[in-house]
Image (tube, rainbow, N blue to C red):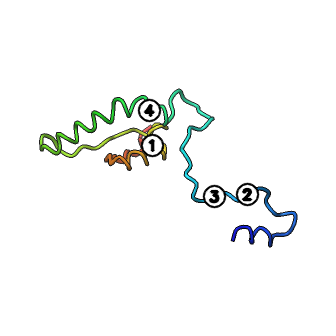
Amino acid sequence: MEMERRRNLPKGQRPHGRPKNPYKIVRKVRSKKRKSAIDWFLYREKVCKPLLYPFYDRMVESHQLEERGVVTLVEDGAGPHRAKALNEYHHDRGINKADWPACMFY
């Protein structure tokens, strides 16, 4: 269907090469333009996986044993905390994350 659409375009407007596969699984990678020393990928690999997630899991277990209340992760508005890929990873992992709006007082 895509090839038919390409053939019907005028000669100068036809794209070259093979059409992109819409079902291709793309791995999320770090961007090349980084301003700070840590980005979402390093934050997830160096902080969250070894330190935060095990602690969070222990807190959830104690909640299930009714030793404490509901466990919610609170992060400020730093760049790595706002990253879409990291938030998707938290959602897939089942981590409850609280909304933390930016500070209104400067």
- For the point 56% across and 37% down, the residue is 30
Q: Classify 10 Å Cα crowding around label 1: few (below 14), some (14-19), many (20 and above).
A: some
Asked if 31 appears above or below 20 in the picture, the reply is: above
For the residues bearing labels 2 and 4, Cβ distance under 8 angstroms? no
| Residue in the picture at 50% in, 29% down | 38
Residue 35 % position (x, y)? 58, 31
Q: Which residue is mark 1?
A: 86
In the image, 88: left or right of 14? left
Displayed quadrant of residue 73:
top left
Q: Amino acid at mark 2?
A: Arg
Sequence-first tag of 1 and 3: 3
Alpha-carbon distance for marks 1 and 3? Answer: 25 Å
Give the SS element for disc 1: helix
Label number found at residue 18: 2
**Pointer 3 local density, CA inside 10 Å: few below 14, some 14–19, many at least 20:** few
SS type, badge 4: helix
Secondary structure beneath dot 2 equals: loop
Percent x, y of residue 91: 38, 49
Name which residue lies at 42% across and 45% down. 89
Q: Answer with the quarter of the image where residue 8 lies.
A: bottom right
- Mark nearest the camera among 4 and 1 is 4
Q: Disc 4 marks which residue?
A: 45
Identify the residue at the far right of this view: 11
